[in-house]
Image (cartoon, grey):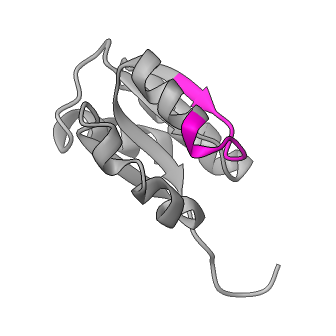
């Protein structure tokens, strides 16, 4: 269900068109899987990048993939913010996940 909701949001709220590229920066496995499936449901071309990559490599992926949106783990927000002005093609920066309360 989460992937379907994301697909609807990407299409309606973000106005992403099928065939456009989205960069998914891996974080928690479940969150990454939901982001990838949601993007695929929306008909987007998915490019994956590891969270461990430096900003120079992430920027390389952004430029070469022609990504118009980026999904990234919330804990990388400060680091990803450094890319905002360097990647003008990106229309949407979408943080995902986060720390949940409770035990476990």
Q: 55 left or right of 22?
A: right
Q: What quarter of the picture does the C terminus occupy?
A: bottom right
Residue at the extreme top = 19
Q: Is residue 1 visible?
A: no
Image position, residue 36 (x, y; %):
54, 32
Instruction: Pick the residue in front: 9 or 98.
Output: 98
Magenta span covers which residues? Answer: 47-56
Image position, residue 27 (x, y; %):
67, 50
Q: 13 left or right of 38?
A: left
Q: Is residue 34 above or below residue 47?
A: below
Residue sitting at x 49%, y 66%: 78
Q: 55 left or right of 65?
A: right
Q: Is residue 20 above or below residue 39?
A: above
Q: 73 left or right of 66?
A: right
Image position, residue 11 (x, y; %):
24, 33
Residue at the extreme bottom = 102
Residue sitting at x 41%, y 40%: 70
Residue 51 colored magenta? yes
């Amino acid at each position: 269900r989460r992937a379907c909701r994301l697909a609807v949001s990407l299409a309606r709220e973000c106005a992403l068109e099928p065939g456009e590229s989205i960069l998914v920066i891996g974080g928690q496995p479940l969150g990454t899987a939901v982001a990838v499936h949601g993007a695929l449901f929306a008909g987007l071309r998915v490019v994956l990048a590891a969270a461990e990559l430096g900003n120079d490599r992430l920027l390389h992926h952004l430029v070469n993939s022609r990504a118009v949106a980026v999904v990234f783990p919330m804990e990388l927000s400060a680091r990803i913010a450094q890319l905002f002005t360097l990647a003008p093609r990106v229309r949407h920066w979408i943080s995902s996940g986060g720390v949940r309360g409770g035990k476990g």
